[in-house]
Image (cartoon, grey):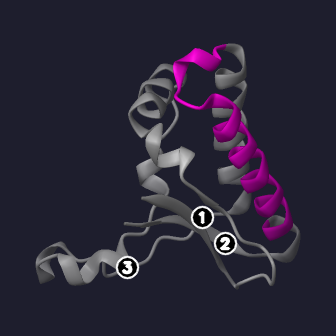
Amino acid sequence: MQYYLTLCPKIPDANFESVAFPKASEQLETIEKRLGLPSHFEFFSYAAQNDLCPPEHQETEIPWYEAQVGIDWLDAVSKDIKSNPASVPNADQLLSDFSECIAILERAKSEGSKWHFAMDM
């Protein structure tokens, strides 16, 4: 499984995907609760999995977020992980992935794109 970023409108050569991110989901939920942040799952669109769900559970409205929301969330979580790298598996890779995601969201912010996370199973 991997998590990836979807931008609207799309930006050429602005791609983010991470295998480390889903592997740390449980630990990230603990960090989010402690910091009073929204769950990373709130930033996902599940529309790509609609064919796996009964109609009443399908996502009918795709969520889009301002780039700054993602930047702020990633920055707060990254600072916490840097202060306690043992709190998540593969902290170095996760921090590298988050840094890459922040760079893409900075670009999205400057180009007026919105975003959400999605997953590939």
Mark positioned earlier in the residue sequence (3 or 2): 3
Picture layout, residue 77 above or below residue 97: above
Q: Which residue is mark 2?
A: 114
Quadrant hosting residue 49: bottom left
Gap between marks 1 and 3, in whole Å?
A: 17 Å
Gap between marks 2 and 1, in whole Å?
A: 5 Å
Q: Is residue 102 magenta?
A: yes
Amino acid found under the numbered disc labelled 3: Ala
Residue 20 is situated, as x and y percent measured from the top left of the image, at: 55, 45
Q: Which secondary structure lies at badge 3? A: helix
Mark carried by residue 93: none
Q: Which residue is mark 1?
A: 65
Q: Which residues are magenta?
A: 84-108
**10 Å crowding of disc 2: few (<14), some (14-19), many (20+):** many
Amino acid found under the numbered disc labelled 1: Tyr
Q: Where's the C terminus, which quadrant?
A: bottom left
Residue 118 is situated, as x and y percent measured from the top left of the image, at: 48, 67
Closer mark to the observer between disc 1 and disc 3: 3
Q: Which residue is mark 3?
A: 48
Residue 88 is situated, as x and y percent measured from the top left of the image, at: 53, 26
Q: Where's the N terminus, which quadrant?
A: bottom left
